Amino acid sequence: MSLYPQIEPYDSGMLDVGDGHLVHWETCGDPDGKPAVVLHGGPGSGCTPGWRRYFDPQAYRIVLFDQRGCGRSTPRADAPDTDLSANTTAHLLADVERLRAHLAIDRWLVFGGSWGSTFGLAYAETHPERVSEMILFSVVTTSRREVEWVTRDMGRVFPEEWARFRDGVPEGERDGDLAGAYSRLLHDPDPAVREKAARDWCAWEDTHVATVRDHRPDPRYEDPSFRMTFARLVTHYWSNTAWLEEGALLRDADRLAGIPGVLVHGRLDMSGPPDIAWQLARAWPDATLVLVDDAAHGAGHSGVRDALIAATDRFAALAP
């Protein structure tokens, strides 16, 4: 199954969401189509044009936006003086609602991957009346246990690379919260310290997802601005476990009752193990779990891509 053809936005803008932040948004497809909102990963990855291609442009009104501090939103997190205190999950949830109201949308399909799945679950459990359906892939909940798994336990799979990652922080912090230690380095007054921390963090990010033979390094990490933005936002969110109570997203999955969902996950996704998606599917009877045997993290595998497009096609016919 092929991705839909590349399309351009028919409308876009910068939404003032308060705290000095302007969020870039765009809409594509049919202005009268079924509304769908895309929640990108990271945090800090930004929404790229490829996200538009999972939806039939003749059926959907596709809303994309760059979350606070990244992409085309301002201020960007890579600036040394950018304050991240007003960049939390609660702020992002409020931003989605503000954008929905700005676009005069009553309910919309929520589509998100990786961090976007955590964000999507938090949004739907907070505002279930605003969600018509959900499509999530590479499902994670950003719990303390999951952060420890990625930043420490994955060293059992990539021991040499993890040792370099661990040794990137001061010796006295190597047995503690590695995400928090990197976050502190990424805000060091010395630009050389910040740059090395961003490189070390992103090198590990590109490693722990490399569990299939055809993995290719993410070229975005070669961009110093993207690298710093991404590293700062991920470590900021991970060191605070996204300001979510441990286990709350799975515990409160009953709030999703009546919302049809599709969960797509790679069986070889070691950095975000499939048991999380499986547990969510058990707690959310209206969700269907699709496990793709030879896929890892992300939507790069053809089986994941096909399952996502099949899901958007399936929901296109349902009333918003």
Image: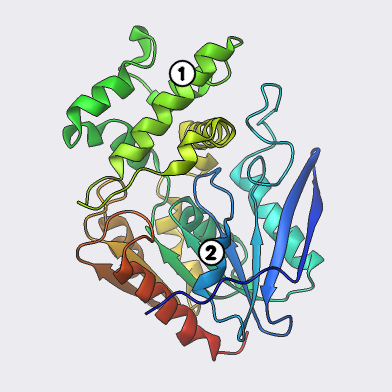
The residue that label 2 is drawn on is 51
Nearest the eye: 277 or 305: 305
Nearest the eye: 123 or 111: 111
Q: Position of residue 237 (x, y in %)?
A: 52, 37
Determine the residue positioned at 31% across, 63% down.
Answer: 301
Say if 166 sits above or below 147 in the image.
above
Asked if disc 1 and disc 2 are in contact, CB closer than 8 Å, the reply is no
Say if 7 sits above or below 274 in the image.
below
Determine the residue positioned at 73% across, 36% down.
Answer: 75
CA separation in Å, label 1 and label 2 = 30 Å
Q: Position of residue 84 (x, y in %)?
A: 65, 31
Say if 148 sits above or below 32 in the image.
above
The residue that label 1 is drawn on is 196
Horizontally, is 79 left or right of 186 in the view? right
Assign a secondary structure to mark 2.
helix
User: What amino acid does circle 1 point to?
Assistant: Lys
Residue 98's label in the rendered image is none
Nearest the eye: 259 or 181: 181
Determine the residue positioned at 78% across, 66% down.
Answer: 101
Assign a secondary structure to mark 1.
helix
